[in-house]
Image (spheres, coloured by chain):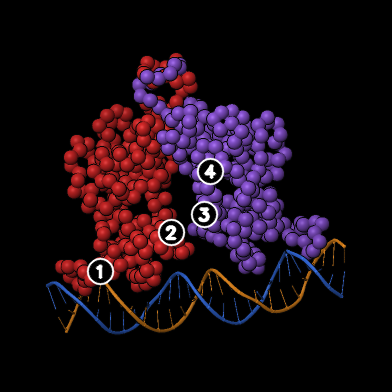
Chain colours: A red, B purple, C orange, D blue
Amino acid sequence: MSKAGNYCYEYPRPMVTTDCVIFGFDGSALKVLLIERGIEPYKGQWALPGGFMNMEEDAEQCARRELFEETGVRDMFIEQLYTYSDVNRDPRGRVVSIAYFALVKILDYELSAGDDAKNANWFSMSEIPSLAFDHDHILRMAIQRLKGKVRYQPIGFELLEEKFTMRDLQNLYEAILELQIDRRNFHRKIMKMDILIPLDEKEANTPHRAGRYFQFDRKKYQELTTKGFNFEL
Amino acid sequence: MSKAGNYCYEYPRPMVTTDCVIFGFDGSALKVLLIERGIEPYKGQWALPGGFMNMEEDAEQCARRELFEETGVRDMFIEQLYTYSDVNRDPRGRVVSIAYFALVKILDYELSAGDDAKNANWFSMSEIPSLAFDHDHILRMAIQRLKGKVRYQPIGFELLEEKFTMRDLQNLYEAILELQIDRRNFHRKIMKMDILIPLDEKEANTPHRAGRYFQFDRKKYQELTTKGFNFEL
DNA sequence: CCAAAAGTGTTCTTTATACACCCATGT
DNA sequence: ACATGGGTGTATAAAGAACACTTTTGG
């Protein structure tokens, strides 16, 4: 009735994995981290990083563990996306996958990568190859979620370095939302929210007027949130 | 290492269940359907309806099956909420639960209930007892999701009968969002969206001027959506 | 001085809010 | 006729979109 193994149950159980859609931003384009599969099934194809859940960890811990193993980054923004449970989504058998999406500061990653044997790469949205399993579907849903969420929660800052210019922030929003925003109205709208700390520092070596650096004020945002403030772009 | 059973695997696997938060609206208050557990663990306590996933169904099919068994209703609105995977969320062992939330027309349910031996009941938001497992937590998240979603997607109609008055609709929104809405502005805003079909029929036996009945125009809404229209209250 | 982009201000349009008034219906 | 709530209108305030002007910086 079933293959041999050490773990026996009265009723059949699916395998449970987590998969992670990791977004990064390189200053002009939104990117996703994919890994090339080294083993069957789908050997040689690109896929979302992920793996099997252990019995002593919950799904988020599993996703964070996998993320750390892949990118060397800890403590990034991570949020559960959706759980995929199609009967035939994995040729190895019945696999339920709890998908997460993560936002990383892309430079943090590039520093600590390379130590892994696996082939990992950042892909722009426009050049994403066909993916293993139902990962195309997961990725599409993740992009949609990111697009929606970025408008009413200040998660964009998770993709930028600590210091950024107003132009960086606008480029980020334009890349995610795929639309043009009026520079001046954007500036005013963001500043009116009062969640950015203006620094005295400015850009260097620009062929034009240098932009001021800002920092996201998490504490202030928390305060305002409890008072009923809603981020909205 | 593990108890006996017919299904043996090389690595341990969690059990997978679905749980469902079923919302209804009785004309004045938002309600949730709970069932009283007949067996251990948490025997005698109230809980969300749910059950173990079979190997030949995906999670949504499982949720719909459980829902049908509990309420006798098919084809209601259902949407995945979140997946709960805390290591100790179930005393029976490692159980991952994929939670859904459903919206039903409460009269449909009341007609076809009673055939089930289990004790099921609708509870108003204000009188919800302490629930089994982590179901309190799940319910809180479901309410939050409903509150958020109802503002930018016309899912409220799933809770009303086919025909409803503007007052019914407003009562629904006031109950879900827990705020007062100006009757006249609400009326104008909804009508401007052009997604309601006004019927010639009116309320009967009212001690005052009768309200006109409306119907939600799904087709029109789909059309408008493809043209970029966004429901928003 | 020029080009390019930052930073600030002003106008116009649209949307939201508050509230006044008339209408229909059962008692 | 009157109490109650439906249906429509209008004035005011707030928010959003479009765009003009000034400032800073490197070449």
From the viewer's side, name the closer residue of D7 and B137. B137
| Residue type at tag 3 | Gly
> Which part of the image, by quadrant, shows the N terminus of chain A?
top left
Q: Quadrant of residue A27?
A: bottom left
Q: Residue B119: x and y, percent? A: 66, 34
Res A153 label: none
Q: Quadrant of residue B181?
A: bottom right
Residue A126 in sight from this viewpoint: no
Q: Are discs 2 and 1 less than 8 Å apart at CB?
A: no
Left/right of residue D7 with respect to residue B60 in the rendered view = right
Chain under numbered label 2 = A
Circle nearer the viewer, 2 or 1: 1
Circle nearer the viewer, 2 or 4: 4
Q: Secondary structure at mark 4?
A: helix
Q: Secondary structure at mark 1?
A: strand
| Residue type at tag 1 | Leu
Residue that label 3 marks: B148
| Residue type at tag 2 | Tyr
Residue that label 2 marks: A152
Left/right of residue A10 with respect to residue A24 in the rendered view = right
- Residue at the spot 62% in from the left edge and 50% down from the top edge: B126
- Residue at the spot 26% in from the left edge and 59% down from the top edge: A162
Chain under numbered label 1 = A
Chain under numbered label 3 = B
- Residue at the spot 41% in from the left edge and 45% down from the top edge: A81
Circle nearer the viewer, 3 or 4: 4
Q: Quadrant of residue B101?
A: top right
Q: Earlier in the sequence, mark 2 or mark 1?
A: 2
Answer yes or no: are tags 3 and 4 on the same subunit.
Answer: yes
